[in-house]
Image (spheres, grey):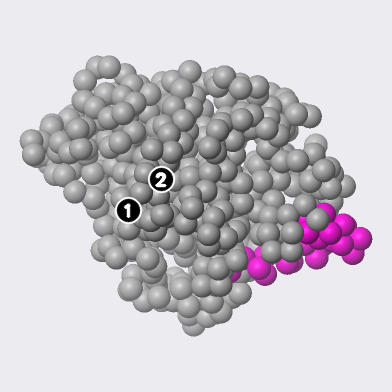
Amino acid sequence: MSGLMVDTTLGKLEGIREHGVYAWKGIPYAQPIIGVRRFAPPQPYGCWDGVYDASKFSDICPQQGLLRTQASEDCLCLNIWSPGADSWKRPVLFFVHGGAFFHGAGSESFYNGATLAKTWDVVVVTVNYRLGVLGFLDFSSLDPSFTGNNGLRDVLLSLEWVRDNIENFGGDPGNITVFGQSAGGTVVSTLATLPRARQCMSKCIIMSGGPTQLQDREECAKTSQAFLDFMHIQSARQLLDISLVDLAKGQKDFMGHYGLGAATFRLTMDEDLIPEHPIPAARNGVTAGFPMLIGTTKEEMALLMIKPLAKILDVHKIVYEGFMQESEQTRKNLSTLYTTRYGERRGLSMLYTDLLFRISSVWFAQEASVHSPTWMYRFDYETLALRMNGLHAFHSTDLPYAFGNFRSVLVRPMFLLNPDMSTVYGVAHEIQHDFISFARSGTLPWAPCDAHQVPAKCYDLGFPIQPMVEDVILDAYQDTVYRARSLKSRKGS
């Protein structure tokens, strides 16, 4: 494999040629999170001497989970795939990974950008950002230099690095499409409302994000203090002296103890970096003129039907607490409606799907569409293996199709009963074509959303345009506490 030298604002770096494109991996955009930098805003990396070796991925950010990869403080890095470091100025797709804000990395195999870059002549970027305790709690009560939302701060700094350097990698700094999935989708829905981010991006794609899944400062402070109490920490020095291994283990144990599962770590409306929920921010015109594509899978929470997966996800408490804020009659009406429409077994997973993802995504699209061109999609395709196991088109099943990566050990089981992959490849081609067309032009060939109609392109055996959510379902949420709370502005408008 031959390398490729590129100049950046920090110095020269050398990548590799693989899978028909060039790749530069493990590029540091921020200083290692050592000492007080663990819980403070990221600091730009600075310049390096000589040529930086960008031939392999960096360590991942501290976590304890499925990834069997080395974690360390030196993890705030990004990865780039491009057909060539030339002057072609290709569209740039900047991806924010998911993982419920406590696990994941831009180096995971199903996020590899080589297929997209080679097939569609684009530049793909993935990024690491701080997670869990390091990224989404706030310990300023121990030291005023500590801040919250550090994971989001990391993404912002990496996005600015890409804007300032991507032209040297064959990308167009004036055409950066930010896309993200799950927790990454929630990050992207928030970035779309932040002026600092909007200076670096031209449009966005939100995949199974949760624009209502933010918390206020009081909730973050409560969780942060609960973690300190759980770990018997009373000072900033004690917090900084914990090893990364112990911190990651303590984080996992705390999640089990605290009872919020996948909702333990969230973005926080801090009246500084994030002054407003994404939906009322869109209603107030913050996203004006900014094209968006917003989508979910058809049955995000079908994995709740598989008990081991349901235990890992563990969202019951957070959903139950929200559901119980509704009147008894509303709860009864919703339960009856979902059981009638989908049956006893699927009714619960579809209710959870809508409460956590689809309904809020529709509200976000409706409010944004008043000021911005906004489209929706729904991923409906399910392989035979998924259908036989009752999983259907559940959360994250669209990722292999969007990236064109089907060989990862984590996704391979979905295709075990598909000896002929032609249909799978056809669905992948269609969704990639739409994503790339949107990245190039900021428009799509089906009708955009408006305040009343929410058409969505549905990726299945065919590709029909249908309502994102049935009217009878959407109407059932019209007078809910959930909707009123989701649309209420903190600014009183």
Spatial CA span between label 2 and label 1? 9 Å
Q: Nearer the viewer, residue 454 or 8?
A: 454
Disc 2 + disc 1, Cβ < 8 Å: yes
- Taking depth in this image into account, of 237 and 27 the one nearest to the observer is 27
State whether residue 367 is above or below residue 387.
above
Q: Is residue 337 magenta?
A: yes
Dot 1 amino acid type: Ser
Image location of residue 247, percent across then percent down: 39, 72
Residue range of the region highlighted in magenta in the rendering: 314-339
Picture coordinates of residue 257, whole percent (x, y):
56, 79
Determine the residue positioned at 48% across, 50% down. 383
Q: Quadrant of the C terminus?
A: top right
Residue 433: image quadrant is top left
- Type of the residue with mark 2: Pro
Q: Give yes or no for residue 268 being in the magenta stretch.
A: no
- Residue occupied by mark 2: 400
**Residue 69 as seen in the image, left or right of residue 145:** left
Can I make out residue 224 in this image?
no
Q: Secondary structure at mark 2?
A: helix
Percent position (x, y) of residue 323?
77, 62
Instruction: Say above or below: 1 vs 243.
Output: above
Q: Which residue has dot 1 on it?
A: 408
Specify the quadrant that holds the N terminus. top left
Q: Main secondary structure of the magenta part?
A: helix
